[in-house]
Amino acid sequence: MAYKITLIPGDGIGPEVSEATRRVLEATGIDFEWDVQIAGLTALEEKGDVLPDEVLESIRANKTAIKGPLTTPIGSGFRSINVALRQALELYANLRPSRTFEGVRSVFDHVDLVVVRENLEDLYAGVEFDTGTDEAHDVIAKINEYADRPVSETAAVSIKAITPENSERIVRFAFEYAKQNDRKLVTAVHKANIMKFSDGLFLHVAQEVAKDYPEIEFNDRIIDNMCMQLMQRPEDYDVLVMPNLYGDVVSDLTSGMIGGLGVAPGANIGVEAAVFEPIHGSAPSHAGKNEANPTAMILTGVMMLRHLGEQAAAKKVEDAVAAVIAEGTAITYDLRQDRDPSKAAGTSGMADAIIARL
Ligand code: NAD
């Protein structure tokens, strides 16, 4: 039976990298029935709504979606459509693996890290009060009734809320991921030495959850020290679990360590549904030129295959991607030393080379 998957091609370079990915996934011989949905700028232009109801309905029904990047138009009423999608579907875990492929320009080699980012709370949730507003004045006045040090009346305020429930759920997800993927170490990343209550809670919960997984090593690092150590000894780390904002930053850092956004896949996993998407955005300056790197989106497809239990096909695609990059001819401009699009393969040409290796 075919897998019914919601496919959101996305904006900018999204349709091109999505089409490349669809072709590669179909070339594995697995049957897919694509339920194509539009969101973002494309949906605003065609339907007058950046996140039409049918997108969420389709993902809820199919339970698995793969999406290209979305552009959030200014004034659309959303801080980010992607964040809205994650929150509406309660996609609590953001999984961002970073592994080096031979042939990709990078300062580091042999990097193999997985960032597990809490996806729903923390400073990223968007609970904010702008400077000079009545709401900010009220919130600040209330805080100042309790705080040892007063918050200035002119401040803009963003709320960092960390709950034990979401901390436990994400740390457990990280350990389960480690268990299922034969990973040896989980590191909790935090700033509990300064944010003793919010990050302190996250750390305490992580330490408790770790006791349920004695077969997996556990340690913790303070976020700033973590960044330094990743630059010095990335091989000492394995699965990194952290609150939302740190995860946002650290996953870009680890993407940079493996050669950039063009090769960095991602997934958002919830209880009811999973949405697979590359880390990169819609890169509008490359849109419609058949020059964007499809690797991140194709590797996102590999993550989806694993999620569906299609381990053999996932390995086949990953190996084909690795072989094409290592060979170094049918690759997009960003993977070339000279970054010259005129000498590089296009998005579709790179997908063709990957399909030929399957
Ligand atoms: P971006 O990822 O689109 O681009 C950053 C840089 O990386 C650019 O130089 C771009 O050319 C390059 N790049 C990214 N993907 C590439 C690829 N596949 N191949 C070759 N080069 C690639 O980030 P941005 O410029 O900050 O954002 C552009 C738009 O994308 C914004 O509207 C933003 O909101 C949106 N965005 C969406 C998502 C998402 O849908 N998940 C994520 C990030 C940004």
Image (cartoon, grey):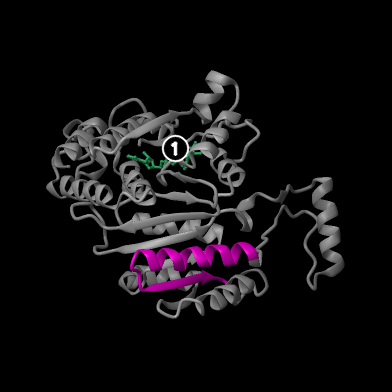
Placement of 271 over or under 222, stated as above or below: above
Q: Which residue sits at x=44%, y=71%?
A: 226
Placement of 307 over or under 298, stated as above or below: below
Of the pair 64 and 1, the residue shown nearer to us? 1
The range drawn in magenta is 165-192
Of the pair 32 and 261, the residue shown nearer to us? 32
Point out the image quarter for the C terminus: top left
Point out the image quarter for the N terminus: top left
Of the pair 213 and 237, the residue shown nearer to us? 213
Q: Position of residue 109 (x, y in %)?
A: 24, 63
Q: Amino acid at mark 1?
A: Pro
Q: Quadrant of ligand 1?
A: top left
Of the pair 12 and 212, the residue shown nearer to us? 212
Q: Which residue sits at x=25%, y=47%?
A: 313
Q: Position of residue 173 (x, y in %)?
A: 49, 63
Q: Position of residue 301 (x, y in %)?
A: 34, 43
For the question of whether residue 12 can be seen, the reply is no
Q: Which residue sits at x=68%, y=61%?
A: 161
Q: Which residue is mark 1?
A: 69
Q: Which residue sits at x=43%, y=61%?
A: 115
Residue 60 falls within the magenta-colored stretch: no
Residue 175 falls within the magenta-colored stretch: yes
